[in-house]
Amino acid sequence: QVQVVESGGDSVQAGESLRLTCTPSGLTFKESGMAWGWYRQAPGNEREGISCITWSGGRTWYTDSIKDRFTLSKDDVKNTLYLQMNSLKVEDTARYFCAPCTVVSGPTILPVRPWKYWGQGTQVTVSS
């Protein structure tokens, strides 16, 4: 049984930093053979992909909304995905999830379908 656990979310002030972690169990990044990334969902909005890293870890993509502020990385030994979030803005407030990803031009980051092992996510709240 595959489970994904995200953590690291918190309530912070604008301009502060957070580091999110994602650890799948029952499946390793290597075994999955897929790129993995982060998604977020703000109240009233659909879940959107914001970053994606290749299976090898050699390339990453970011949407314009987070580019130059967030950094995605993964540790295959620890089987953990990270999202370092700097210079947080009020509009970054959302629940954050991780899952396999695929990238189309833009970049637009989409979940690999079908993916039925979404975790509970971790809440990030940024206040001004």
Image (cartoon, grey):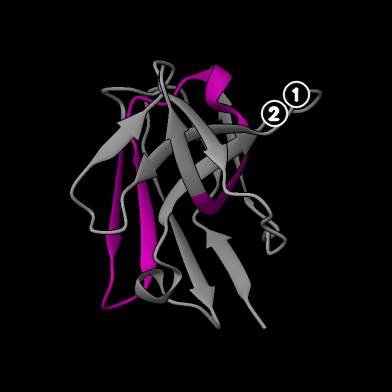
Which label belongs to residue 45?
A: 1
Which quarter shows the N terminus?
bottom right
- x and y percent of residue 105 in the render? 41, 20
Q: Residue 29 occupies which quadrant of the picture?
A: bottom left
Residues shaded magenta = 71-100
Which label belongs to residue 88?
A: none
Q: Residue lying furthest right in this view?
A: 44
Q: Are the residues flagged by discs 1 and 2 in contact, CB closer than 8 Å?
A: yes
- x and y percent of residue 126 in the render? 55, 28
Give the residue displayed 39% in from the left and 16% down from the top: 64
Q: Residue 5 occupies which quadrant of the picture?
A: bottom right
**Mark 1 and mark 2: span between their CA atoms?**
5 Å
Is residue 64 placed above or below 17 in the rendered structure? above
For mark 2, what is the residue?
Answer: 42
Left or right: 89, with 81 as reference point: right
Residue 125 among those drawn in magenta: no
Is residue 11 placed above or below 116 in the rendered structure? above
Tag 2, which secondary structure?
Answer: loop
Other-residue count near label 1 (Cα within 10 Å), few / some / many at <14 / 14–19 / ≥20: few
- x and y percent of residue 88 in the render? 42, 26
Tag 2: amino acid: Ala
